[in-house]
Amino acid sequence: MIRMEQRVLSRTGRAVSAVGLGTWQLGADWGAVAEPDAFAVLDAAVESGVTFFDTADVYGDGRSERLIGRYLKDRPDAGVYVATKMGRRAEQIPENYVLDNFRAWNDCSRANLGVDTLDLVQLHCPPSSVYSSDEVFDALDTLVAEARIAAYAVSVETCAEALTAIARPGVASVQIILNPFRTKPLEEVLPAARAAGVGIIARVPLASGLLSGKYTGETVFAADDHRTYNRLGEAFDRGETFSGVDYATGLAAAAEFAGLVADGATPAQTALRWIIQQPGVSSVIPGARSVGQVRANSAAAGLPPLTAPVLDAVQELYDRRLRASVHPHW
């Protein structure tokens, strides 16, 4: 097994790898992944030093959780910390974020993952008003008291939601979209999280693959891939697909970003390295559909830090090409 930098996930007291593994793709919305391929991805992650898996109860209607549960049952020595999410099994209205529903959703996740106590449960991008509800966080505290969950956190769409959640004393971490094409969280969210002792989990780190530099205007994604059917937010928040960036604009920016990559690294690894070295980031969670992708992503943790001129060039690229195209909502 390869050693990787481990970082304490703030209030949980648990160490997680600087590069984790997002497992949305093992469930659905990125095209089919066969079980043997899914297990190979999980195994390659562990062998690459990954100790943090991120999943959700709705990824493939629980398929992602079940695969992780089966894998870790056979690898009790892996030392993996698993974060899942809840809330998307019901209509997205604040009234559904209540203790009885939380217990029911927890029961499904605990069965899927094969554990009595879930390591970390994140509210899955709920309606904004949920973050201001004392009753919601009282219910989450009850789940901890009942030993259904060890800790709770939130996954957010906006910086405003993140800042509201960070003010909650029981919130262990905030998961937010952060990459060179979405830099706004650097302005307020990461400093506030550091000050409060709240972890930051960076998702959509490659802007749905744009930052890999592999796509062109002729690239065709599968019909069941959200990069086909959610470009304008038709199915869920547009920010989850290409970070909310217009595809053509993103391709042009990705071509420029590729010009900043040092010898021996790929654009994807450079994007991950950029995230890793942002102060306050606990873990970045790229997804992967193949063993090669897992190994390449994990290797980003071992790259030298990006230099000040490269960091400045990334920010200049964002300001010039992308800032005006990113909706104020994000």
Image (tube, rainbow, N blue to C red):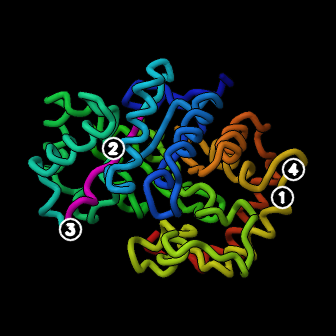
Q: Amino acid at mark 4?
A: Ala
Crowd around label 3: few <14 · some 14–19 · many ≥20 (10 Å)? few
* Above or below for 97 versus 50: below
Q: Of marks 1 and 2, which one's residue comes earlier in the chain?
A: 2
**Mark number for residue 91?**
3
The residue identified by callout 2 is: 153
> Residue 87 in magenta?
yes
- The kind of secondary structure element at disc 3 is loop
Q: Which residue is mark 4?
A: 262
Q: Position of residue 171 (x, y in %)?
A: 31, 41
Q: Amino acid at mark 2?
A: Ala
- Badge nearest the viewer, 2 or 3: 3
Q: Are marks 4 and 2 in contact (CB under 8 Å)?
A: no
Cα distance, mark 2 to mark 3? Answer: 20 Å
Mark found first going from the N terminus, 3 or 1? 3
Frontmost residue, 146 versus 9: 146
Mark 1–mark 4 distance (CA, rounded to whole Å) = 6 Å
SS at mark 2? strand
How far across and how far down the image is residue 223, in percent?
A: 52, 75
How many neighbours does mark 1 have within 10 angstroms: few (below 14), some (14-19), or many (20 or more)? some
Side (left or right) of 96 relative to 253: left
Task: Specify the segment rendered in magenta.
Answer: 82-91
Q: Are marks 3 and 4 in contact (CB under 8 Å)?
A: no
Q: Quadrant of residue 153?
A: top left
Which one is closest to the eye, mark 3 or mark 1? 3
